[in-house]
Amino acid sequence: MAYDIERYLNVRSASAPSFGPNGELAFLMETTGENQVWRVDEPEAWPDQISFGEERVTSASFSPTREELIYGMDEGGDEFVQLFRLSADGSEDVPLTDHPDAIHQFGGWSHDGDRFAFAANRRDQATFDVYVQGRDETGADATLVAEGDEYDNLSVAGWSPSDDRLVLHESHSNYDQDLHVVDVASGEVTHATEFADETRFSSVSWAPDGNGLFVCTDHGADTLYLGVLDPDGGTIEHVVDGGGWELEAVGVDPEAERLVYVRNVDGYSELTLADVHGAPLHALRQSNATTGVDELLLDPLPTPDIPEGVVMGLSFDDAAERVAIAVSAPTENTNVHVVDVETGESERWTRASTAGIPRETFRSPELVHFESFDGLDVPGFLTMPDGDGPHPVVVDIHGGPEVQRRPFFMALRQYFTDNGYAVFEPNVRGSAGYGTEYLNLDNVRNRMDSVKDLRAGVEWLTANRPIDPERVVAYGGSYGGFMVLAALTEYPDLWAAGVDIVGIANFVTFLENTGDWRRERREAEYGSLADDREFLESISPVNNAEKIRAPLLVLHGANDPRVPVDEAEQIASIASEHVPVEKTIFEDEGHGFAKHENQMTAYRQVVDFLEKHV
């Protein structure tokens, strides 16, 4: 039987696991309407909700030594996250910060559990400074340890094993980052990555001896690999290669000298556990005297037995005998699994509800590839409904643009395919996961080449699958919303309808009005107002809206700090002069829809809109 959209929107997810000092697990789940902190003490036991705010919780991290957590929460989607200390039974909930006009990015507990670090733009909206604060301190008690005036978008990547240093992540753009180490006592900052070339660092973790850093980086390569960085010498020793795919995350337990890393293989996650054996980091590779070939001193442990999907989050327990992960798979809603490090066996610790929808009815996407206008091979995921067709298709375009559509569980995908739609999710040029060259193919003046990829994808679909070319829908959010609007203006006869969710309509006003902390990073990708204004005006959908022929639905949050709501107002006003346009602004939302009630309203409107026009 087919289920209503409301039923699918009640499918829950348990994510962001964090082990407590006594083996309990905290995680986030949206059962009450928005993400809150929950706790479970053994596999599939009934969980306890321990935070009870009216707004979404964005993160939660257990203390390594005490029965307490620190969590973050914003208000109305404004992203001005404040930090709170929460007892593990929920009985005590203490505000740690009191700067409602600043973003606070949690940077981890010290290993003794006495302090925590964070980055915040308190002094200047465009600048993130780094602070350290005692667990029992509140308000203005934080100590400023590194000013961010000379850096781009600083965040804290973790404490050293001896708790005397922090590694800082500086992001110039999504394809160019730097790492720095700050001495907490003196405030002295060491630049650890003085490289001439643009370099990505997707994940960083201190090595057990505290003299180096495990990094997932593309320094000197096209794809991310696992390396060891000497922060004093500024050199990177290559440890594990991804075999043409990207190593995207690494975690280390310094006391147990154990390591876990994740490889992204065409969107699917491969999890590897290993012992470091206390080897000095410069000697992780040593030459075999007989063969002359470098041998890896990491000792791989058994391959974890986990669902085939996407791994999100890594948390070792106190003795590093287990690691908790959240796994999302095409036919498995997101749940927390715990892997036994020695055996590789895993247990699911949470049982997030499928809202009564039988798991066997969920469909898996097919991994496909198509050739674009210039011969580029473009990957994507295609999920087909039952029946012979021809079927309508929703072309669902991810945001970013430097992210990747992956085979995680998506309730909306399942709804569409259960109700006769095909769903096509292309990873057009500029997507992450396929190396630096692919990531940069859409930068600045090449922006519209990614829109050409959409046309090529639709042409491939209609030629190779039972798809109705008269019922093709462009659907996307954030940057994906721009792609929807650009596709409607560039190739107006290709689309039966468009759905733009929190999308960019005018690059000039977007860059003028987006959050100060984001502008420079966005200009690196899209082009600058100083140098590229004329080009940005030429490709902005609002300036080509007269070409739109398809009905358009526009949904946006009034508090959106990333893509201000005026983007929705502009495109809806101009497009409505010649095509049917529906527009809804959610007054208590930001960049997307966090509140369950608003999700119900928004996606019911999407469903009704497509039923009317497609």
Image (tube, rainbow, N blue to C red):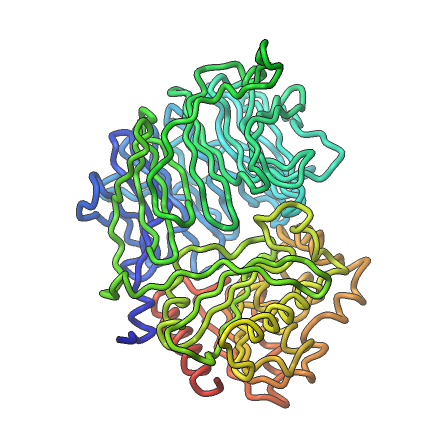
* Rendering coords of residue 330 (x, y %): 39, 57
On-image quarter of the N terminus: bottom left
* Rendering coords of residue 111 (x, y %): 40, 25
Q: At 60% across and 27% down in the image, what residue appears? A: 238
Pick the front one: 497 or 307: 307
Q: At 74% across and 37% down in the image, what residue appears? A: 197
Total labels drawn: 0
Q: At 82% across and 58% down in the image, what residue appears? A: 531
* Rendering coords of residue 396 (x, y %): 51, 67
Q: Is residue 261 visible?
A: yes
**Which of the 4 image quadrants contains residue 136?**
top left
Q: Residue furthest top?
A: 289
Q: At 56% across and 42% down in the image, what residue appears? A: 245
Against 329, residue 580 (above or below) is below
Q: Residue furthest bottom?
A: 578
Q: Is residue 196 left or right of residue 307?
A: right
Against 411, residue 100 (above or below) is above
Pick the front one: 525 or 278: 278
